[in-house]
Amino acid sequence: MAKERLTPEQINELKTLIDNKESSRPEALRAQAVLLINAKSTKEIIKLLTSFDKKYAFKLRKKFISMGLVALLDKRKAKPRALLRDCVKINLVF
């Protein structure tokens, strides 16, 4: 059984995610791991660049092929922190 290769559209999707300033660092590292697996990189290179094991990178690639870009995105996005606390806001209003 031959392994399924990524299409050029999928590769461009991953590169866009890596270059996107709004994506988090873990998201970019996951995308980079998928690209490295697709390029048949060694486990040492994958570990050095992404700090992921080759086994985990294969899992990410499999999930990306089946689910798309959603598989690499963070489950929980960080909420922006409030600049002022509630008690300070009340004092400023009154």
Image (cartoon, helix red, strand yellow):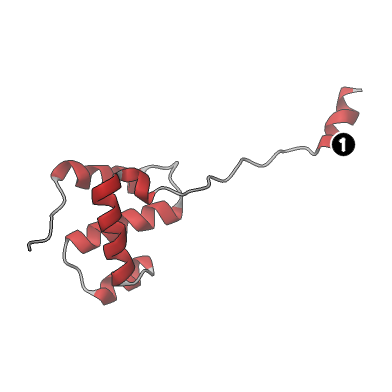
Q: Which residue is mark 1?
A: 87
**Disc 1 residue type (three-letter):** Cys
Question: Looking at the picture, how far across and down is residue 26, in whole percent?
Answer: 43, 56
Question: Looking at the picture, how far across and down is residue 34, in whole percent?
Answer: 27, 58
Question: Looking at the picture, how far across and down is residue 71, in whole percent?
Answer: 36, 49
For residue 86, above or below residue 92: below
For residue 87, above or below residue 56: above
| Residue at x-position 39% and y-position 70% | 51
Quarter of the image with the N terminus is bottom left
In the picture as drawn, the residue positioned furthest to the left comes out as: 1
| Residue at x-position 30% and y-position 46% | 67
| Residue at x-position 13% and y-position 55% | 4
Question: Looking at the picture, how far across and down is residue 58, in whole percent?
Answer: 26, 64
Label 1 environment density (alpha carbons within 10 Å; few <14, some 14–19, many ≥20):
few
- Asked where in the image residue 43 lies, by quadrant, the reply is bottom left
Q: Is residue 21 left or right of residue 41?
A: right
For residue 93, above or below residue 46: above
| Residue at x-position 41% and y-position 47% | 73
- Asked where in the image residue 40 lies, by quadrant, the reply is bottom left
- Asked where in the image residue 20 lies, by quadrant, the reply is top left
